[in-house]
Image: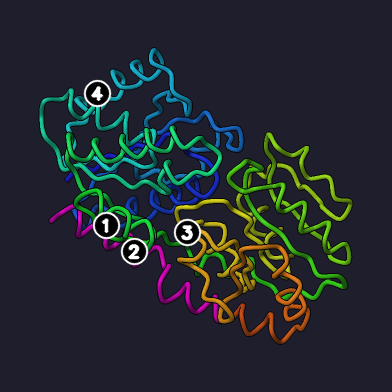
Amino acid sequence: MRVVHVIEALGGGVYTYFKDLSFFFGENGPADDLETYIIYSGNRKEIDPSKITEDFSKNVKLIEVPMVREFSIFKDLKSILKLRKVLKEINPDAIHLHSSKAGVLGRAAHFLLFDKKKLFYTPHGYSFLRVDISPLHKKIYQAIEKYSQWIFGGTTIACGDTEYEIAKQLGKSVLVRNGISINELQHFYNPVLNPVLRIGIVGRITAQKDPELFNRIATLFPQFQFVWIGDGDLRSLLTAKNIIVTGWFLNQNDIMKELNTLDIYLQTSLWEGLPIAVLEGMALRKPVVATNVIGNKDIVIPNETGFLFDSPAELENYFEQLKELQKRILLGNNGFRRCQQVFDKDKNFRKLVSIYKH
């Protein structure tokens, strides 16, 4: 059985997801009679396109097709025709589209094949949930999601619980949560005891991650050190003197080593699908303090694995509790166990195998 994955947004947590997917299906695919192809676009700034073949399993076939994030009639049409050509050559049994842009381009390319395949789509965070766009754009994106599934068919494979609840309202859907390589991450785990609380986030400095809020929190708590592991176009918004911006780490091992130095993982997102970086923080036994939004609230159990907040005013109480080492250890260990139980990528990828076949 040939399965093709199509992704435009190969960056951030999605990069980790696909790297893990490539090794899982590269190693286990032959036993399940699965042959895996990944069609991707390497345009994101935070990745080194030359490292993709090095980072991904040699047992999956990688095919680069240029795709752009923004809407462009000419470039999008060119991408659709290229996707159609590649899909026709592969002749897959199933096509799995990832993220909104690939969902639109991939559905159009599949339609132009005039040869119906099993079609799956994972939003990794619906575009109409963004808060950095106008109400009109939200309605347009929601209509695209709704009618794309109605016209082109297929099954939505939601990556998180709240995404699944939304997906059920739009059409046929199932839940397969994002997962991480928990055992591999343990190589980077070492207990830390910083003289000053070290609080940080991993990701692109974009509107989605709300660097303004991260900066405001750092300003409110000058006694702590804040770290942004990553870089991005909105770096200039991080002006507080107690913030360190590491810049891009193009080696995933370096990211994990830096992540392990944190005492607390702080997620300031305005919206999410199911954030891989938060799971990685939990797997490294970091208590998580996160905004109370879709994605974050599907991971964090308040006062058990961390805290959810709606306003920075709530953080004084939470940080005061987390100043105590034993509290951080308790919540961190709880988070690690929750990852083992719910967010193990091998268990969750195994569910995909069943879906593709049946």
Q: Identify the residue at image location x=43%, y=41%.
A: 127
Mark 1 / mark 4, whichever is N-terminal: 4
Mark 2 / mark 4, whichever is N-terminal: 4
Q: What whole-number distance in Å separates the C-alpha atoms at marks 4 and 3?
A: 32 Å
**What percent of the width, then of the height, locates residue 58?**
40, 43
The one nearer the camera, 110 or 126, is 126
The tag on residue 84 is 4
The verdict on residue 135 being magenta is no
Compared to 243, does 140 lie above or below?
A: above
Give the residues in magenta.
Answer: 334-358
Compared to 121, does 144 lie above or below?
A: above
Q: Amino acid at mark 3?
A: Gly
Report the side of 318 relative to 9 (left or right).
right
In this figure, which residue is indicated by the disc labeled 3? 295
Mark 3 / mark 2, whichever is N-terminal: 3
Of all residues, the one furthest to the front in this rendering is 135
Q: Amino acid at mark 4?
A: Arg
Q: Identify the residue at image location x=60%, y=50%.
A: 252
**Label 1 environment density (alpha carbons within 10 Å; few <14, some 14–19, many ≥20):** some
In this figure, which residue is indicated by the disc labeled 1? 352
